Image: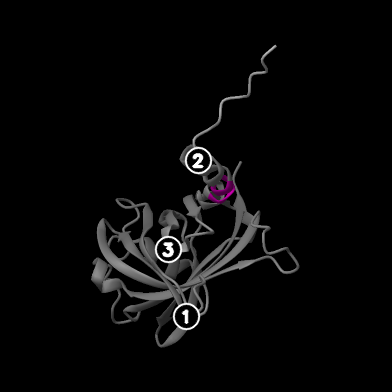
C-alpha cells in the first residue's frame, strides 16, 4: 500500500506564512489605542494678568477623543472640546467678564476646541523632554494654530508595557486678541497661559 505524503508548501509561501505569523503581534501593537479622560484626574487651567496680578481659572472638558500609537507616537491624535460656558476664575466679576460678548462670548460660542495636527517628539524619541503637539484651536468661532509643550508618562511603579493608565501634561500660551477676545484690554493682559494635566484611561 502506497503511503501518501502531505503536499509540500512552496518555499516562498512557507516563508511568507512564517513572516505573517511573526509580524502579527507587532501589527496588533501598532494599532492606536483609544483613551478616555478620568474626570477626577483632569485639570485644565489658564492664567491671565488682571491689573498686573496673576489670576487663575479653570475650564471643564466637555468631550475628548484621544488615540495613542505606542509604536509610532507621531501618529497619535487628540481632539478635545472644553466647556467655555462653565469657565471659572474664582472672582465673580472676572468670570462674568470672561463670558461676556467682548471676551469668550459664550452665549454664541459655548465651546473651545483643540484638534491636533502634528506631533514632534523630544530628542530621545519620546512624548516628553521637549516634545510638542501642534494643532488648531477654535475659540469664538475663530481657528488659529497653537503649539503646546507635551509630556506623556506611565504611572509610577507600572511596568513598561502597562499602558492602561497614562498621565499627560500640556502647557503653552496664546494671544486672546488673535481670536477677537479683546474686551477689557485696559485691565487684562493679552497673553493667556495654559496648563493642562490629564489622567488617561484605556477605553473599552
Q: Is residue 74 magenta?
A: no
Callout 1 environment at 10 Å: few (<14), some (14 to 19), or many (20+)? Answer: few
The quadrant the C terminus occupies is top right
Element under disc 3: helix
Q: Is residue 24 magenta?
A: yes
Does the rendering let one see residue 2? yes
Q: Quadrant of residue 51?
A: bottom left
Residue to which mark 2 is pinned: 11
Tell me how far mark 3 sits from mark 2, CA to CA.
37 Å
Which residue is at the front of the view, 182 or 96? Answer: 182
Percent across and percent down for residue 101 are: 28, 60
| Segment colored magenta | 22-26
Residue to which mark 1 is pinned: 123
Does the rendering let one see residue 104? no
Q: Are marks 3 and 1 in contact (CB under 8 Å)?
A: no
Element under disc 2: helix
* Residue, far front: 1
Horizontal side, residue 83 vs residue 107: left or right? right
Percent across and percent down for residue 196 are: 51, 68
Amino acid at each position: 500500500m502506497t503511503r501518501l505524503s502531505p503536499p509540500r508548501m512552496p518555499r516562498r509561501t512557507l516563508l511568507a506564512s512564517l513572516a505573517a505569523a511573526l509580524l502579527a503581534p507587532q501589527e496588533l501593537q501598532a494599532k492606536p489605542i483609544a483613551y478616555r479622560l478620568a474626570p477626577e484626574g483632569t485639570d485644565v487651567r489658564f492664567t491671565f494678568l488682571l491689573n498686573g496680578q496673576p489670576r487663575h481659572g479653570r475650564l471643564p472638558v466637555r468631550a475628548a477623543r484621544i488615540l495613542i500609537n505606542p509604536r509610532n507616537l507621531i501618529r497619535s491624535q487628540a481632539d478635545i472640546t472644553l466647556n467655555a460656558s462653565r469657565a471659572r476664575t474664582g472672582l465673580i466679576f472676572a468670570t462674568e467678564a470672561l463670558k461676556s460678548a467682548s471676551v469668550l462670548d459664550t452665549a454664541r460660542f459655548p465651546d473651545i476646541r483643540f484638534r491636533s495636527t502634528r506631533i514632534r517628539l523630544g530628542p530621545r524619541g519620546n512624548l516628553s523632554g521637549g516634545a510638542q503637539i501642534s494643532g488648531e484651536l477654535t475659540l469664538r468661532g475663530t481657528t488659529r494654530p497653537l503649539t503646546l509643550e507635551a509630556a506623556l508618562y506611565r504611572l509610577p511603579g507600572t511596568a513598561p508595557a502597562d499602558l492602561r493608565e497614562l498621565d499627560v501634561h500640556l502647557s503653552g500660551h496664546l494671544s486672546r486678541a488673535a481670536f477677537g477676545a479683546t474686551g477689557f484690554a485696559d485691565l487684562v493682559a493679552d497673553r493667556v497661559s495654559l496648563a493642562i494635566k490629564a489622567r488617561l484611561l484605556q477605553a473599552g
